[in-house]
Amino acid sequence: MTALQVTVTTADEARAAVVAGVTMIFAAVGTVSAVPLSELRAILAVAGERAEVVAAVGGLADSDLADFAATGVTALALPVPQGDAGAALLSRIGRSLAASVRLVAVFPPEAGPDFDLLPVAAIAGFSGVWLSASETIDGLIKTIKLADIARFIASARRSKLTVGVSGGLRVVDVGTLLPLRPDHLGFRAAVSEDEDPAKPIDPARVRAVAAAFAIHSVRPEADEA
């Protein structure tokens, strides 16, 4: 079943998300930039055992990653460039951290996902991959074709990786993306006040997105055959 993931930047937002029933939190600034280590620890304290916490570590030096891994986060999410640079990063980070924490490779869709890197991520010891666009009005749905999102999810499955998609998603996108069966759909703008990702989390909007998940998760019996 596809999970609802909410991006938070502070412990207060994490508290609002958990109270609204969210069980998967992404601690990040923007798409994949890291929150301060002290704030991450506060978010983890709020989440407790009620929610998984994946921490963005974009923009950090390799030497800082171990400190984030040691906080007890569920996983670290790293932005991965295309081509040889991406393969080298996956190999390097996998060797140093895969034994101590789950790792997620985050791919921007703007230039088209590098499908060849998905099996590389699996071999390097990463447990999951995400397709994540910026939180703009266009977002993921207008940045990349639905067929390519479906291909990304299918490719991840073949490599036995968990897979998520996020970036500027709105409530109306739930019905479009749930049939592709990613492991999670990530939201920020849609669950923020006035649908502005720079504003705090709005619990009422979180519940609205959760309701859309519930509605679109009900499938006719014929679809289950």
Image: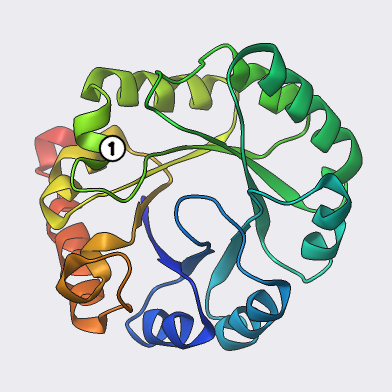
| In this rendering, position of residue 61 left or right of residue 173 | right
Query: Where in the figure is residue 194, as x and y percent of width and height?
Result: 15, 72
Q: Measured from the top left, where is residue 100 in percent x and y?
A: 86, 53
- How many numbered marks, from 0 up? 1
- Residue that appears at 45% across and 32% down: 108
What residue appears at the point 37 percent right and 18 percent down from the top-left corner?
Answer: 151
Give amino acid for label 1.
Answer: Leu
Q: Which residue is mark 1?
A: 140
Task: Please say if 25 is above or below 114.
Answer: below
Q: Quadrant of residue 40?
A: bottom right
Please tell me whether residue 115 is drawn above or below residue 2 in the rendered image. Answer: above
Residue at (47%, 80%) from the top-left corner?
A: 14
Residue 205 in sight in this render: yes
Asked where in the image residue 143 lies, by quadrant, the reply is: top left
Pick the front one: 102 or 137:
137
Q: Crowding at label 1, few (<14), some or many (≥20) Cα neighbours within 10 Å?
A: many
Helix, strand or loop for disc 1: helix
